[in-house]
Image: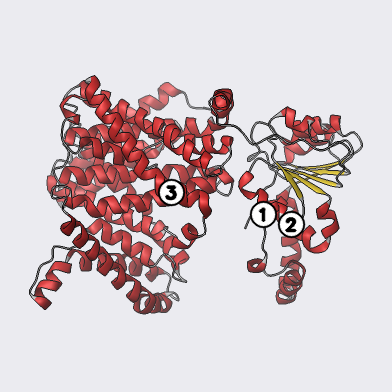
Amino acid sequence: MTGVSLPRLLGTFFLLMMVPATVLASGEGLPSLVRDIGICIVLAGLLAIVFVRLKIPEIAAFLLAGVVVGPVGTGMVTDPGNIETISELGLILLLYLIGLEIDIRKLLASGRILIVSGLLQYPLCVAFGVVITKLLVWLGIGGELLSAGYAPLYIGFVVAASSTLLVVKLFQETFQLDTEVGRIALGLLIFQDIWAIVVIAVQPNFATPSAAPILLSFLGIAILSVFVAVTSKTIVSRAFHWIAKTPELTLMGALAWCFVVVFVGINLDTFTDKLFGINLHMAVGSGMGALIAGAGIANLPHSTEIITKVSTVKDFFITLFFVALGVSIPAPESMDVIILAVAIAIVAILARQFVFFPLFYFTGVDQRNSLVTSARLAQISEFGLVIAFLGVSFGHMSPALSSAVIFAFVITALTTPLLYNKAYDIHGWVRPLLEKIGFKAPPELKVETGTQYKLALLGFFREASSLLHNLERDNPELVKQTLVVDFNVAIHEAIAATGATVKYGDLSNTDTLHHLGLAQTQVILCTIPDDVLRGSDNRSLVELVREMAPSAVIIANAVSLAEVENIYQAGADYVYLARLEAADALSAAIGQALDNHIDVYRARHEARHGHHGSRKEVMS
C-alpha cells in the first residue's frame, strides 16, 4: 500500500464511523424513513471506501454499516417499519436485476456438462448440508440454534448456492469470464438462481407441506408468468420501443414494469375473489414477482439498454438490502452463533469439493478445471441470505440462526478473493492426492515418433479459435498438418472436426512440453495471454520451446508493451499485442469513416471474414 500506512487507514476508519452521528443530528427535520436511508447510505459509502482500499469485498462493508447503525451498534436506525421498508425495497430490486440477467436460451445451449451438473448440484448440496447439520447437532455444535425442525433444511439451502455478485465480479475484473472455468461457473450460477427461485416459491408452505398449497403456489407463479410473457411481448415491448427515443425514460419504464408485475402477483387472490368469488391462496410474493418481471423482459430487443439503465441504480438498492440485513442482525446471544457461523462457512467450502468437484469431473470437465471452478465458487450466495431472511419472517428459523448465516456469508466473502487467486495453486498442491484416489487427468500428449506438423498451437483460446476458422476456410491442407495442444477437453471434439489434430496437454507442466515433439515443427504459436495462461507465462514458454525446437519459428503474444522485449530475448521470432493489431484495423476503419466510405469498408470486411453471426467457430 503506497503512501498510506495501515494504522492511518484504520484510524480514519474509526473516525468515519463517527460521522453518522453528525448526520443524525442535522437530519432531525427529515422524515424518519429518509433520515434512516441517508444514514445507511452515508456510512455504507464511507466504509466501502475503506474496505476497497483494504481489498475486502464491499458487501462486508454494507453489512457492517447495518450492524453499526442498528440496535447492536449505535441504535441510530431502530424503527422496525423503516428497516422492513428498506429490506423489502432492496429485495425487490435485487431480484428484479437477477431476473433481468437470466438468459434461458444460454441454459438450453449449455450442453450436457452444465445441464447435468446444474440439475443435480443444488439438491445434492442441500442433502449434504442437512446430513452435516445433523452431524453437528450430534457433536453438540450449534446448541439450540440447530434444534428447530427446519434448521438443517435451511443450512442445506444456504450452502447449496454461490455468490453471483462476487464470482461474476472477480471473473470480469480478471477478464476470465470467457474461459472454460468462467463459462462453467456462470452457467452453474444461473442454475443455482433458478433452484433458489423454486425454494422461495415453496417457502410459504413449509409449515403445511401438503401438495395442494404448493401446487397452488406454482399455479399462481404460472399464471403470473403467462401474464408477463404475453404482455412483455406485446404491450411492454411496444412501450419500450416508443420510449427508446428518450433514454431517460427507460429506467422509469423498467421500474414501473417491475412494480406492475409485483402488484399483480400479490393481488392475484383479490382478483379471483372479485371476479369468481373464490380465494385460492395463490398470491405471488413481491420478490418472486420482481424476479419474474425481470426474466420476462430479459430477452426483449431493448433488454441491453434496460439492463444498462437499471444497473445505474443497482448498487444503491443492493446497498440498501445488505445494510438492512446488517441492521437486522441481533447481538450474538452466545458463542454458539459465532461457532455455528464458522461451521456453516466450512460446510459451504467442503460442499464445493465433495459435491461440485465430482459432478464436474464425471460430467466431462478435466481434473484441473473441475477443482479450480469448485474452489472459486466456495462462498455463500446472496440468495442464501434472502432465503434465510424470508425464513425468519415465516417463523421457520430463529433470528440468531439467521445471524449465524450472515456471519458465515461474510466469512466466505472474505475468503473468496484468496481462493479465487490461489485456485490453480491449490490444484497443484492436491493433484497427487486426487490422482491417487482415482480422479485422473486425461492422458498427457504423446506424439507418435516421426510425426511432423507445420503448425502447432500451444493452448486454444479466442484468438486461436478465430485463426483456426480462417485456416479451415482458406487453407484446409494446413489445418490437417496443425497440432492443437490444450487441456480444455470439452472443446477437443469441435477442434478435431476442423481436421486439426488435438491432444490434451497442460502447458504449465514441463513434461508436456518435452513430449510435444516440436523439433520438426515449422511454426509454433501461443495465443494465450499471460492473464489467462496459468502456471507459466509467454516468456517462460518461449524459452522452453526454443530449447526444444531451435529451428522453429516461434510466435508469442504479450499483454503489455513492457513484456515484448523480454519475450524476444527468450527466443521468440515475433511477438504480437492484440491491442496493436486491433488498433491497425480501427485506424483503417476510422480513415474510411472520415472519407464517408464506412459502408464500403464494412462490406469488404464482411466479404473477407463473413458476417460475425455466421462464423461457426469452436469458441463463439
Determine whether the residue tagged by mark 1 lies in a helix, strand or loop.
Answer: helix
Determine whether the residue tagged by mark 2 lies in a helix, strand or loop.
Answer: loop
C-alpha gap between disc 2 and disc 1: 7 Å
Residue 260's place in the image compared with 141, above or below, is below
The three-letter code of the residue at mark 2 reads: Thr
Q: Which residue is located at x 86 percent, y 36 percent? A: 449
Give the numbered dot on residue 498: 2
In-image side of 331 versus 122 (left or right): left
C-alpha gap between disc 3 and disc 1: 23 Å
On-image quarter of the C terminus: bottom right
Residue 210's place in the image compared with 124, above or below, is below
Residue 136's place in the image compared with 506, above or below, is above
The three-letter code of the residue at mark 1 reads: Ala
In this view, the residue farthest toward the right is 551
Per the image, the residue denoted by label 1 is: 494
Give the numbered dot on residue 397: none
Badge 2 vs badge 1, beta-carbon distance below 8 Å: yes
Residue 533: x, y in percent? 66, 38
Colouring of the image:
secondary structure
Q: Which residue is located at x 48 percent, y 31 percent? A: 419
Per the image, the residue denoted by label 3 is: 118
Badge 2 vs badge 3, beta-carbon distance below 8 Å: no
Locate residue 429: give its quadrant: top right
Determine whether the residue tagged by mark 3 lies in a helix, strand or loop.
Answer: helix
Residue 29: x, y in percent? 15, 50
Q: Earlier in the sequence, mark 3 or mark 1?
A: 3
Q: Residues within 10 Å of mark 1 (few under 14, many from 20)?
A: some
The three-letter code of the residue at mark 3 reads: Gly
Residue 397: x, y in percent? 17, 38
C-alpha gap between disc 2 and disc 3: 30 Å
Residue 435: x, y in percent? 58, 27
